[in-house]
Image (cartoon, rainbow, N blue to C red):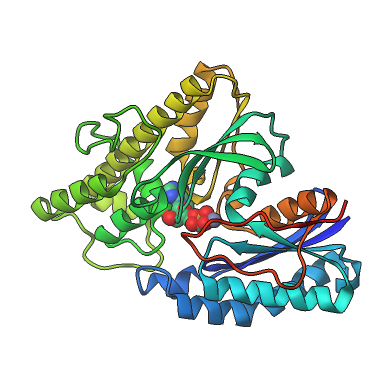
Amino acid sequence: MITLGIETSCDETAVALLDNQEIINQGIASQENLHSLFGGVVPELASREHMRLLPLLIDSVFDRARMVMGDVDNVAVARGPGLLGSLLVGLGMAKGCVLSTGANLVGVNHLMAHLLVTETQERIRFPALGVLISGGHTQLYKMNSRFDLELIGRTLDDAMGEAFDKTAKLLNLPYPGGKYIDKLAGLAEPDKDLLPSPNLDNRNLDFSFSGIKTAISNFLKKNDLSLSKMDPEPDIENIALQNPDVAKLCASFNWSMAKTLYTKVKRALDKENDIQTIVMAGGVASNHFLREKMSQLAGEYSISLLLPSPSLCTDNAAMIAYTGFLLAKRGYVHDLSLEGIPRGKSIPWDYNNTT
Ligand code: KG4
Ligand code: ZN
């Protein structure tokens, strides 16, 4: 079964071709450089870039795979949550492909796809604990099965990736700055008492990251550490050498974020005591220190930990194609009335079951 995956929910235009669960070919065009100048994603520009890049990317992925649109059985497309204008570009293209070929149309929940993509590397054993940490979301799921995800914890304000990106912005690092904080953190020792580890003084599984953002902002008002000018391609080793206090702040921030995540995930494991696997996914799951802390926790509980490779953590189309393939195999498909769902609205389970 050949599945074409299309992802345009935020600022990455991505296309992938799968033969069952095997990735045949994939391509991604990042808009990071465009949006970095504005310190965040500009929705209008993102949609226009998707419109320009998506047809070119589809052509090149089919060329490299030596395949044509007529070979495709399923067209899987991210249907939300995301920026509505961006989603509509992907949905329009997916509907066009389906109209011209008669392939199945499968709308895919972007969040579910982040969690399931690790299966292109290794099978998940259920029930699993899904730790979804991205630029837009911070959520804990009890994954009873592939399509039965129960939300058991979530952020009350900022997402984890947002906290990384806002901290990077305060330091004058380009958007999205999570990966720079991660690299700088690897070049210094943390001061474990410098920053608060947010929202731990309770018994719940929810997160809050607005406090740590304020703590960083207050710290930077008292200590003028921000880099004097923003370099679109920062030389991280040089920054760490010239500004050891910036690297230390990044290491301390990374440490506080990891402590929060470790504590909440440990609490979830104690509460749901039948978990077989932890799946950590989303862009922030490529963070080195968070991966290390999660491995330590999984070791303490003698359960397995599945971490997608870093390129499958950030937005990609292989995750959309794989989830679309699983859904289509079970007969879950959509008709051409499929709609995009913006961020903040829940994704309906509105498949036409053909089996
Ligand atoms: O999953 P993703 O690509 O997009 C969303 O669905 O939101 O996640 C993007 C987020 C950004 O906030 C980015 O700064 C963060 O993932 N990120 C990282 C790292 N790499 C990407 N955060 C911390 N450490 C990293 N190594
Ligand atoms: Zn994402």
Q: Nearer the viewer, residue 187 or 276?
A: 276
Residue at 19% in and 37% down: 194
| Residue 183 in view (yes/no) | no
What residue is rendered at 38% in x and 38% in y?
Answer: 206
Quadrant location of the N terminus in the rendered image: bottom right
Position of 36 compared to 322: left or right?
left
Residue 104 horizontal side relative to residue 282, left or right:
right
Q: Position of residue 276 (x, y in %)?
A: 63, 24
Camera sees residue 241: yes
In the rendered view, would you say 40 is above or below 48?
Answer: above
Q: Nearer the viewer, residue 295 or 90?
A: 90
- Name the residue located 90 percent from the left edge and 67 percent from the top edge: 71
Toward which corner of the image does residue 48 lie, by quadrant?
Answer: bottom right
Counting every numbered tag in the picture gives: 0
Query: Dividing the picture into quarters, in which one does residue 153 lie?
Result: top left
Residue 287 place in picture, x, y as percent: 46, 43
Residue 145 coordinates in the image, percent (x, y): 69, 36
